[in-house]
Amino acid sequence: MVLKNIDVLSAGKMLGCLYGLLALIAGLVISALAMLVGLGNPGGAGGFEAMFLGAGAVIILPLVYGTAGFIGGVIMAVFYNITAGIVGGIKMEFVRPTDETI
């Protein structure tokens, strides 16, 4: 089988979700680190900024990365479709799973 065409919106949605999920995980790590920095200096100036850095990382990063992933996925799917029309696409082999592989 040869993959000659990728649905543009499908690729955009998939990559948008994957990039958003990756950014959420990164945002949670950044948020946890920001909380640790804020706990090390209670009542100081660093705690307030650390709180906004942590919340921003969990909210803003997934939105920005998800949007960028969607746009990038759409662009790359269009480029793939154009290129596959010229050079023929990617050859793939699919096999049915047997009882032994399940």
Image: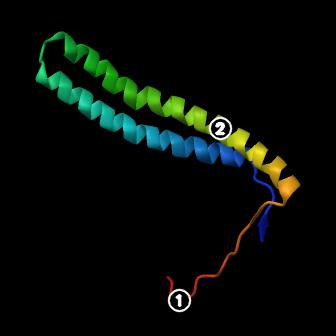
User: Residue at (25%, 27%) from the top-left corner?
Assistant: 34
Residue 101, position as x, y percentages in the image: 51, 84
Which amino acid type is marked by label 1?
Answer: Asp
Residue 94, position as x, y percentages in the image: 68, 75
4 to 67, vertically: above or below: below
Disc 2 designates what residue?
Answer: 72
User: Residue at (61%, 48%) from the top-left corner?
Assistant: 14
Q: Which mark is residue 19?
A: none
Residue 85 in which image quadrant: bottom right
Q: Residue furthest right?
A: 86
59 horizontally vs 37: left or right: right
Q: Residue furthest front?
A: 87
Q: Quadrant of the N terminus?
A: bottom right
- State how the image is colored: rainbow
User: Residue at (25%, 32%) from the top-left corner?
Assistant: 33
Disc 1 designates what residue?
Answer: 99
Which amino acid type is marked by label 2?
Answer: Gly
Disc 1 crowd rating (10 Å Cα; few below 14, some 14-19, many 20+) is few
Q: Secondary structure at mark 1?
A: loop
Residue 66 in which image quadrant: top right
Residue 102, position as x, y percentages in the image: 49, 82
